[in-house]
Amino acid sequence: MRAFTVVALLCLSMIPTLSCPLEKEMSLQTTASNALPWMNSTSEKVVKELVATYGDEQRRRAERGLHQVSEFWRPEDGNAAAFEEFATTNFAGNPATLNTMFNRFQALIEQLNGHMHEINREFRQQADLDAGPILPFDEIFAGYDPRAHVIDDFFNNKLAFVVLLNFPLTTLQERLTEGPKWTRRQWAETRVAEMFSKRVPASVNLEVARAGSEADSYIAQYNIWMHHVVDQNGQRLFPPKLRLLSHWNLRDEIKADYADAQHGLAKQQAIQQVMDRIITQTIPQVVVNNPNVGWNPWTNEVKAAGEKDSDIPPPANLPVTNTPEPCTRYAMLSLTYKAEKKVDPYSPTAPTLLARRFDEDREIPEQRVRAMLEQVVTSPLVPQVAKLIQARLGRPLEPFDIWYDGFRARGAYTEAQLDAIVAKKYPTAEAYRKDIPNILEKLGFTPEKAQYLADHIAVDAARGSGHAMGAAMRGEKAHLRTRVEPTGMNYKGFNIAVHEMGHNIEQTFSLNEVEYLLSGVPNTAFTEALAMVLQGHDLEVLGLARPTAQSEALKTLNDFWNTYEISGVALVDMAVWHWMYDHPEHTPQQLRDATIVIAKDIWNKYYAPVFGKRDIVLLAIYSHMIDSVLYLPDYPIGHLIGFQIEEQMKKAGAIGPEFERMAKMGDVTPDLWMINATGKPVGADALLEATKQALAKVERH
Ligand SMILES: [Zn+2]
């Protein structure tokens, strides 16, 4: 529990963007650099008073508390006399009062957060569940977030200042070096203070939200109409109506094309060429999201479409020429950077977006994340796995083979057979719910634990593909949402249900068995890793054969190759943000040029030696770079964490008890969590060791 804006929907594609409603702008705003003239002398005076009242042993706490309050106090909060009165009245100067204060804040924050979460869940019901048509007002309910103003309210009524006066704000460095020695109570005190570690004016939040939603809608409409893309000989490669969203669909088409022995390679080469044009922004403006023009991405020649496969009208006022897109991709990123930079002065313990993402959200220092990613991309296993891929493909590697998708074992059952088995077993969501205790026992939970968990999980039929929505107060149920077709659940729905149930189990243990302020996991990668472990055992739950050693080895190689690819992507994302902070006055064109240099550099360093081709820009294609900034490093970290957890469960020989033991650690730093779980901090060793063994197995085969 670190914020009132906890998004309880898991599974990344499901996370909705929180809207930031218009707020009345504050008339007066102070920043750290614009401190009030009376603040220092008044603070010193109050410390003296507090020490006189409570004794010298309270001096350090008093000094720290007053400093923390002074960093956020604005003129409209009151003058020197009001500040003095506030501090002398609200300082908990003895352990008994501090204890009462802590316990009451913990209990009341749970009430507030828990009930607001329930309101939010109910308001979203029509949008999230398979419950008939969505009327226009349902969307307004779904978009309303009762938590949106809580932080502002708590600063205005001064409860936030009570927290800052009494509980310590810490830096990541302190949490890393001191944290292992802290009691659970000390950890919880740190977490409650963190809830109020920034006081961002409404106007700045609004600017961040606006930049975010502009970037979202730019990315959401960035389609390429593939039937109109021709190869070097002017031939069409793709079927009519195929519209691919950048980058997800483009990348997934490359993956799918490995199965097309006849035209796959040509299609993959064309998509690489398209990606190149998007990254370098040499793509003609008129081909973006427009089925009315034909395009040769090699020569960049554009003409009216020779065939019609869509009724979408051509864009107005855009002549059919190859005038390039005017650097919009980088203008969007630059806009987000400029908005985030305005948050910096209001976030004293994490004064850059890089610090907020690494020190606050992930709680792993950036240098350590970089070192882990570099350990993966420089691993001697990379050329060995690359050699294996080359042998399986029967041709030299091409740059787009970073998305090689051929490490797939053929299962013992076809998808249709699995669908039939699942539909018979689970005709409704209710049938799945009833079977939860039985499923959990198969996964190694004791009958008592299985029943306890089943009692804490509600199952709903989802409108979309599925998600897990935890509770935010003890006693409330976690919700498992999965899709059930009229003919019953299919295998895909079941596979997702098992994954989401993994989230629900984590949520149930880490809420009900943990101090409220420490509920949850260190970051989303942890709950994803736990959910993945359960998902990987879905066939056993159905009473079918376990995956063979060979198919598990192939899966490991697939995960390793994905981690190698996405590590480079994450390194590009991180380097681009450093460049922006180093060049705050940049233009979109300069940002484009810098991104190209960075992407080529990282390619040349870690990929060119394996692929034998230099100066490739593909690592900069991910849309997350534009619309979910600095999120990409979570993917490789998630893979590393997943392997560590999996290895521990294999070692322990059972999933159930290990799952419970790990989830009960709560929201401490990732390293502390992982040391408790596996004996080692977060790192790449488990992945690399598993890959080494998998490589030996596959090569022997
Ligand atoms: Zn998930």
Image (cartoon, grey):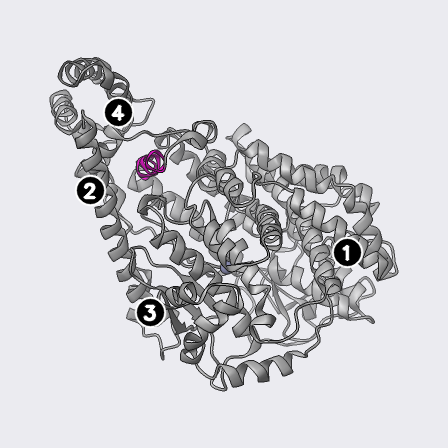
What percent of the width, then of the height, locates residue 668?
43, 40
Q: Earlier in the sequence, mark 4 or mark 3?
A: 4
Q: Earlier in the sequence, mark 1 or mark 2?
A: 2
Q: Are the residues flagged by discs 1 and 4 in contact, CB closer than 8 Å?
A: no
Tell me, for residue 610, which label it has, or none: none
Q: Say whether residue 474 is magenta.
A: no
Q: Quadrant of the C terminus?
A: bottom right
Closer mark to the observer between disc 1 and disc 2? 2
Closer mark to the observer between disc 4 and disc 3? 4
Q: How far apart are the two marked residues, 3 and 2, measured between alpha carbons?
A: 31 Å
Write the start and end of the magenta stretch as one range.
Answer: 184-197
In this rendering, position of residue 593 left or right of residue 213: right
Given the image, on which type of amino acid does mark 3 rest?
Answer: Gln
Q: Quadrant of residue 548?
A: bottom right
What crowding class fits label 3: few (fewer than 14 Cα within 10 Å), some (14-19), or many (20 or more)?
A: some
Q: Earlier in the sequence, mark 1 or mark 4?
A: 4
Q: Which residue is identified by label 3?
A: 125
Say what secondary structure mark 3 lies in: helix
Helix, strand or loop: magenta stretch? helix
